[in-house]
Amino acid sequence: MRRRGSLLEWLWNIVQRGERRIIRVMVLASVLLLLMQLSAVRDPLDFYMTVAAKVEAPPMELPALANAEREGVAKTWQITLKATPAAPIRVVQNGTVIADLAKGEQQIAVQSGQIQLDGIGVAQTIRVQVIKKDARLLEPRHNQIMILQGNIMNFTVKP
């Protein structure tokens, strides 16, 4: 004859089975979360290089360029750049070379938007400093320094 258990024992067994299932689901969810995180972090070097590229050369601000095109006439501002030591660094805006820093210091008329300092082919490290700028410009900052090591550096001109 089968022994009949109490109602309390029966409930206790149901709770224990439920706990086992919950623990199994939690372990499975933890393993899935770990696998998802490992697949997201494929190569830390690629992640670092992407972040560094965005910091060194931020993307162009398209709304600012669209507003300048709508106005028809783009305003120009004067900035003075100084290369230390003097080197053939090309200053490019909108695909056009607007200055060369071979003499060291150069006053340049610029429009709002992106400016590129092209130091490709220059073997030494060059510091380019903004020594004068129009007072109405927010960017570049006065005495802002950009360091070129044979690469291209972008900065923004923003009123």
Image: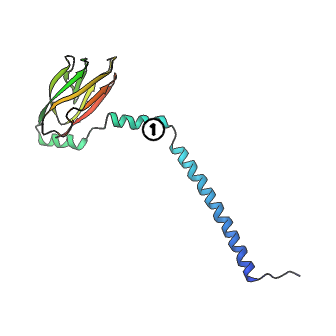
Question: Hey, which quadrant is residue 2 in on the image?
Answer: bottom right
Q: What residue type is labelled 1?
A: Phe
Residue at 14% of width from left, 43% of height from top? 70
Establish if 30 lies above or below 9: above
Residue at 12% of width from left, 33% of height from top? 77
Q: Mark 1 points at which residue?
A: 47
Element at label 1: helix
Establish if 104 lies above or below 95: above
Question: Hey, which quadrant is residue 151 in on the image?
Answer: top left
Image quadrant for the N terminus? bottom right
Count of numbered badges drawn on the protein = 1
State the image coordinates of residue 25 (x, y, percent, origin top left).
63, 61
State the image coordinates of residue 114 (x, y, percent, origin top left).
23, 34
- Name the foreground residue: 71 vs 106: 106
Residue extending furthest right?
1
> Is 119 situated left or right of 82 in this image?
right
